[in-house]
Image (cartoon, helix red, strand yellow):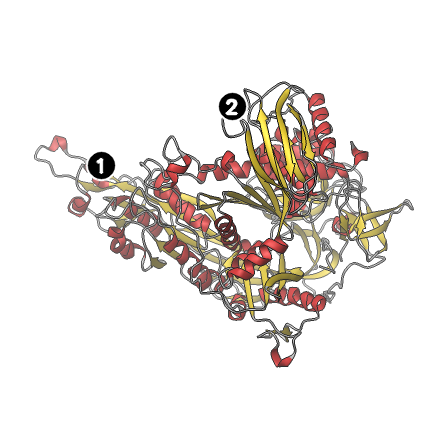
Amino acid sequence: MGHAYTPGLTVTERTTVRKRRLLPIPGTVMVAQGDRVKADTVVAQTELPGKVHSVNVANLLGIAPDEVLDYLIMKEGDPVQKDDVIAENKPFIKFLKTEVRSPVQGTIDTVSTVTGQVLLREPPHRLELLAYIDGTVAEVHSRQGVTIEADCTLVQGIFGVGGETWGELQMGVTSPDEALTPDKLTSGMKGKIVAGGSFLGADTLARAREIGVAALVIGGIHDKDLRALLGYDLGVAITGAEKIGITLILTEGFGTIPMAAKTFALLSRHQGQKASVSGATQIRAGVIRPEIIIPAGVTSVQSQAAVERGGIQVGDYVRVIRDPLFGRIGQVSALPPDLRQIETESHVRVLEVGFPDKTRAIIPRANVEILEG
Amino acid sequence: MSAATQAPHNKAADLPLSVIIATDCGSTTTKAILIEKQGDTFRQTFRGEAPTTVEAPFEDVTRGVLNAIAEVEELSGRKILDGEKIVTPAGAGGNPKAGVDIYVSTSSAGGGLQMMVAGAVQSMTGESAQRCALGAGAIVMDVLASNDGRLPHEKIERIRSLRPDMILLSGGTDGGTVTHVVEMAEYISAAEPRPRLGMTYSLPLIYAGNAQARDRVTDILGKKTALVVTDNIRPTLERENLAPARNKIHDLFLEHVMAQAPGYKKLISWAGAPIVPTPAAVGFIMEALAKRDGINLIGVDIGGATTDVFSVYGGVFNRTVSANLGMSYSISNVLAEAGLANIMRWVPFDLDEQTLRNRIKNKMIRPTTIPQTLDELQIEQAIAREALRLALIHHKSLATGLKGVQQERTISDIFEQKASGGSLIDMLKLDLIVGSGGILSHAPRRIQSMLMMVDAYEPLGFTTLSVDSIFMMPHLGVLSTVNEKAATDVFVHDCLVYLGTCIAPIGQGRDGEKCAEYQIAFEGSRQPESGTLAFGELRLIALGDNERAKVTMKPVKQVDLGEGKGVSVTREARGGAVGLMLDGRGRPLQLPTDARTRVAALTRWHQAVGLYPQKSL
């Protein structure tokens, strides 16, 4: 692929995001096209079928499966309460009577004369789908959900855990290379999105959860602290469903890595504003990155037209994303067209990057990402 | 025994072709190759690559296909596209540099084919169903069975929460249990499963169980799923009959799953043969190779997210996919499954745990990066050894004979299995290992690919090793369904790169003590070589591509080369890009546990075979 390059993460002051909010199964859309919604507005809802429990009546009564109907005192579709008798035998001696009771409240779903089992279904429960961001309903997908559009400031992270949340954005440090230590977290940060600098450790995570911080945004963490947070070693980067009481977003990667200056400055400018964040990450085809969305307010702003990149160019700012210069940010100073042999003896396409300290390095093109936005 | 053969269905006689364009639509890239007839032989001539465009913002797979073909057009000077149409036949409009005779494609884009399977008894019909789905190229998300240890409501919840592309329900031999099969059907019905793609269509479900339960299953599932009934995959305890269900899987893959994926309807209309799931196509070509040469083989495709292992033993084909063992997206999972110590044992230097863990996670979140330094390359190759090893263990556990029965098949005579249900994978009877995937196909030195496979698989006795040059096995697999000669020609001439032969005596001894004496007689005028292989020694002897040598190994009394301890063995060995590797490190391979001794041993072996550039050692 002649034009191959790693698209970078978007960090931009003004853009328009469109979020598809879809139910897992068909239901009812609660808003109309053009409606203004808040992050906590219910935009669609549905009834999720209840849990199914099985009771093998034939086994419990010691009868053949095809006799089950004769012993049932309820039929398919009947409502039942927990401990209601659903089947019983009729012995000559009352003492030998056996009753089969429902383990749950719900309905009789199916009765099988082949297996002798009765399936009981708990009542359905309502699933409410929230808007997640403040914005406008741009499109309604009949019975499925909506697309919400918002003019906003957008920061994409590289990796995150934890689900969607929202709150006031607050900076926890004063410079991007400063670590977010536990003493920088105060009780006033409860329910807020706290952004830090280069690193946070397990002690900071523990303190944030104790206070009730909604989300943390940071340059990097150690893998061992992620393991401690999740309780297991994450094997594949498909996240967002963790129930850990906090959302965590990394902007740079694993290790101690100062947050990119542009990202830090952008977040600092919006301190005090409401932000919606999601840690959901999917690094597979159909990539999803964690995000911090800061709505621009009711007044619609002129969004920047999306510019389709033709590829990497001299002068572009890039972040090195592999050792030995991992995390450094510089500017592309040359794009040699020919393949170059690198230390591993592989022949790859490379570029030359100039760093702020005036040093230069030759790096495989696959090992940089463009700073977008 | 597992499996009827996995011959591609709808196989017609070879179509008369001279120019072929083939694509493989992978999760991240779409790869196109041009095949042209040169004299009597088909050769792969040009290739192109472009990002796959199944996902937003394009949401049309054909964009990536057109881009990849456009790159082939540019490189070859052949006009293949007319706007968004493929020009057929070759020589169209009297221009010999225009058009192709056929377009064929495979696909694993959008996560490939994801299936859930169910059987009555886990180790019997459950396993048969799993082998059937895997052989058809699917990723098996879960295997449900009456005795899988889960409570009914847990099974139902699991079925509901998974959103497979398709379900395969088996269970019972013909005339056997109806109850257990119906029970599984009832659970599926209660769960009201929904397909992964699309909200509005019914989930395809194949019933391939006890014929006597068909009516009941149809009553229960007919209205809730797109039910297709086919022959029982286990008509008797002693026999598996996987082909009809596999063929149905391929049909439904095209009709339902692919039809839901963006742009596939158009792609299907362009193709001159049914589009096949990528792993199924690789299986076709592996099986054709084993059949052609009358050999037992193991093939491996180690990708970014998954590792597929294929084997053909005594004509019996098996495939497994280790869904979360891979070198980029799943690299962190290799660490989680193998453990740090197992990875570090292959690394020829010291590294602290935190640094290694962070590096691996950084590769996971930025999967397209490549090793820039030698130590990074060595770490990746260490991880690859573990991914390969774990995937083979997984494969061995599923590539087994039928469990719990006296085997009928003649294969049991060949393999002298002591108990039914044993693994078919006997490393001593293995003739060829075929490696594929970036880390093997694109290793800077071919010896690196060879040693990764030797370390991971620990082949015994004489074993030939090879790699796929540019991962074109999927293209050739689907091509073999329309023109076997074209597929075989390209496979032999352009696809398979023979690395050489590994000769590994079985047994242990103290480092430096004699393991075996060897004599090598070469073809032509080259002088024979002889010598002594010591324990703990790795030795490389030059033997080029297309060269063969007669090797006599006389092991010491406690060492076996396949004919018994101390018995001399003479066999022909094939050369290749690496040559003959005499592996005196002993089997099973035991690495020193002490870090300093281990690093010293690794360094010695690496130097002996020229594994890495000298400056690092």
* Residue visible at 44% across and 40% down in the picture: B398
Callout 1: residue from which chain?
A
The front one of A15 and B572 is B572
Residue type at numbered disc 1: Leu
Residue B558 drawn at (x, y percent): 54, 20
Q: Is residue A134 visible?
A: no
* The C terminus of chain B, quarter of image: top right
State which quadrant residue B220 falls in: bottom left
User: Label 1 neighbourhood size at 10 Å, few (<14), some (14-19), many (20+)?
Assistant: some
Residue B473 drawn at (x, y percent): 57, 54
* The N terminus of chain B, quarter of image: top left
Residue furthest out toward the right: A358
Q: Is residue A257 left or right of residue B416?
A: right
- Mark 1–mark 2 CB contact (< 8 Å): no
Q: Is residue B436 above or below residue A147?
A: above
The front one of B258 and B219 is B258
Q: Is residue B164 above or below residue B264?
A: above
Mark 2 residue element: loop
The front one of B477 and B432 is B432
* Residue visible at 72% across and 24% down in the picture: B600
Q: Is residue B532 above or below residue B49?
A: above
Which of the labelled discs sits on residue A156, or is there none?
none
The residue at which mark 2 appears reads as B565
Mark 1 residue element: helix
Residue A123 drawn at (x, y percent): 36, 49
* Residue visible at 79% across and 34% down in the picture: B616
Residue type at numbered disc 2: Lys
Residue furthest out toward the bottom: B93
Which of the labelled discs sits on residue A60, or is there none?
1
